[in-house]
Amino acid sequence: MATVQLINIKKVYPYVSGEKKSNKKKGAEPEKKINLQITDEGVVAVQEFNLDIADKEFIVLVGPSGCGKSTTLRMIAGLEEISGGELYIDGKLVNAVAPKDRDIAMVFQNYALYPHMTVYNNMAFSLKLKRLPKDEIDRKVREAAEILDITQYLDRKPKALSGGQRQRVAIGRAIVRAPKVMLMDEPLSNLDAKLRNEMRAEIIKLRERIDTTFIYVTHDQTEAMTLGDRIVVMKDGYIQQIGTPQEVFNHPANLFVAGFIGMPVMNFFDAKLLREGEHYFVELGGHKVHLSEDKCARLAEKDVPSQDVTLGVRPEHTELSKDGVAAKVDVSEMMGSSVHLHLTAEGRDIIIIVPTVDMENIPRMGDELRFSFAGKVAHVFSKEDGRNLEY
């Protein structure tokens, strides 16, 4: 199918006529407003974006609203002009190539179906524009409908379908074209939680049945973690980290990634990193934990000295203990197989997850307790710039 390569891609929205430009002197730090940089050129939405996407790979761009992920997708589609850098699809430079000639298909958040056409005609429309034979069009539409389990809806119009069914039609309309690259811009965000779960599973199945490269945009980290071969975490127009879901979860590059990926979010503490020869410890609330051998090796290789750090520990990696860090229970949330305990510890609000194996001994609101964690699950971040000190 196709590889996609983005080299130093940049997107700047220039000032409209009459709009006041920045009064900052040349060389001054660019102003930031609502997550975007304001420069003399205009508003910088995406900057220094570099990514190589392999053939048939499923890449997910994830980040908070306004981070530039949809803008990046629209530049790949040709719906936004590229301000700087080079975009290659299947080895061909496509910066100046029209969207219709890029051999891509895009699925939008709002479905974008023709309301006056039946499902069949919606899916067949692009093939009719190509003047393909009727029997070929019919075969392609019915094959796609069968893959997506919407054959029974081919004679209906979009208004007679549920949100999940409409999204299936939108995906079907894209895959009948057998595009080199499939672009999906938050396609599940308009669905309720149950339908989102079902459609995530459908997209995973779809990916196995069609040979194409997927680039998927979402602000939902669950979608990113379950769908992507690799995920690209973005913030303020910059890439924060690229890696497999497990790499990003287990080895976050900085505080932002650590706090954005994972649910509930990672707990953070003000702590001390102590070096004793080739060994490292973290000290929190008088509780000293020896970091794992691999973590010690990475820190020693970078010759990281003892210092104040931000310590990160995920709620699921924390456990109750007799001699750990002191805390007090503020709220206890029953979640079925586990209880989420909202605690106050070391001046921070944190969450720990406790299995509901022994319900009689689950702490209640107002209880005082202690918790601990293993050295292999502790993450140490720089107080200065928030980077993970291991990398």
Image: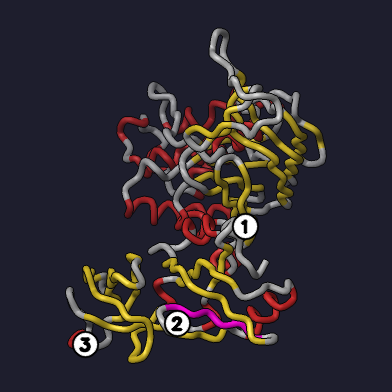
In the rendered image, which residue does mark 3 sit on? 361
The amino acid on which the numbered mark 1 sits, given as a three-letter code, is Arg
Instruction: Return the disc, 2 or 1, that comes first in the chain's sequence.
Output: 1
Label pair 2/3, CB-CB below 8 angstroms: no
Name the mark nearer the viewer: 2 or 3.
2
Q: Residue at x 69, y 87 (%)?
A: 277
Label pair 2/1, CB-CB below 8 angstroms: no
Closer-to-camera residue (16/87): 16
Q: Quadrant of residue 380?
A: bottom right
169 versus 219 height, above or below? above
Mark-to-mark CA distance, 2 and 1: 28 Å
In the rendered image, which residue does mark 2 sit on? 373
Q: Residue at x 23, y 74 (%)?
A: 329
Q: Position of residue 23 (x, y in %)?
A: 59, 20
In the rendered image, which residue does mark 1 sit on? 230
Answer with left or right where residue 355 lies relative to residue 331: right
Q: Residue at x 34, y 84 (%)?
A: 320
The amino acid on which the numbered mark 2 sits, given as a three-letter code, is Phe
Q: Position of residue 166 (x, y in %)?
A: 39, 38
Q: Which residues are magenta?
A: 279-284
Q: Secondary structure at mark 3?
A: helix
218 versus 161 height, above or below? below
- The chief SS type of the magenta part is strand
Q: Secondary structure at mark 2?
A: strand
Answer with left or right where residue 264 lies relative to residue 356: right
Q: Is residue 182 magenta?
A: no
Q: From this viewpoint, is residue 221 visible?
A: yes
Query: For the residue carrying disc 3, how many other residues have a C-alpha within 10 Å: few (<14), some (14-19), or many (20+)?
Result: few
Q: Position of residue 47 (x, y in %)?
A: 66, 37
Q: Residue 122's mark? A: none
